[in-house]
Amino acid sequence: MKKMQDMSIAIIGTDDQTSIMRLAGVNKYCRIAEDGGDNQRQEIRKGLDTFLKDPSVGIIMIPENWRVHVADMLERMQKAKGVPKKAIIEYPLGLKAEPMDVKAFYRNYTRNLIGFNVEI
C-alpha cells in the first residue's frame, strides 16, 4: 500500500482551473473545453477514468457542477470491494450566495468515504 506522502493530487477542470492548481503544485491534470456538449461529458469521464486507474493518485478534484456527468462512476468506485478508494473533492466554480453548513458537509463526506461518522 502506498504511503500518503507518495500519493498525488489530480484535477479535472477548465484551462483556468487547472492552471491555477498547477501553480499550487498539482502536476496531474485534465483540461476540459467549456463547450457544454456531449464531447465535454466524454472528456470528463475519460479524465476521471484515467485518474481512478492511476495508483499514484490519491485525491481527485472536480468542479461540483460536473459531478452529474460522472455520478455513476463515483458510485461504482465507492461500492467496489478490494480496490483502494480515492478522495473526490468537488470544488465550487465561484462564490455562492447561500451559506453552506460545513460541519454537515464534512460529516456526510467522511461517512461516505470511510463508512462511519467522525466527530471532533
Image (cartoon, grey):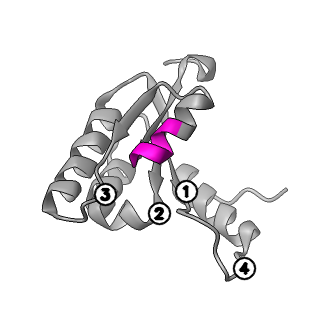
Q: Which secondary structure, mark 3?
A: loop
* Residue span colored magenta: 13-19
Q: Is residue 81 left or right of residue 107?
A: left
Q: Earlier in the sequence, mark 3 or mark 2?
A: 3
Measure how far apart labels 4 and 3 are at the Cα level.
Answer: 27 Å
Is residue 17 within the magenta segment?
yes
Which residue is tagged 4? 99
Position in image of residue 95 (x %, y %): 64, 69
Which residue is tagged 3? 34
Q: Residue furthest bottom?
A: 98
Q: Amino acid at mark 3?
A: Glu
Q: Earlier in the sequence, mark 4 or mark 1?
A: 1
Closest to the observer, 17 or 58: 17
Q: Is residue 64 left or right of residue 110?
A: left
Say which of marks 4 and 3 sits in front.
Answer: 3
Q: Amino acid at mark 4?
A: Pro
Please say if 72 is above or below 31: below
Q: Which secondary structure, mark 4?
A: loop
Which residue is tagged 1? 91
Q: Earlier in the sequence, mark 3 or mark 1?
A: 3
- Residue shown at 64%/75% (left/top)? 96
Position in image of residue 119 (x %, y %): 80, 59
* Tag 2 and tag 1, C-beta contact below 8 Å: yes
Q: Which secondary structure is most common in the magenta stretch?
A: helix
Measure how far apart labels 4 and 1 are at the Cα level.
Answer: 15 Å
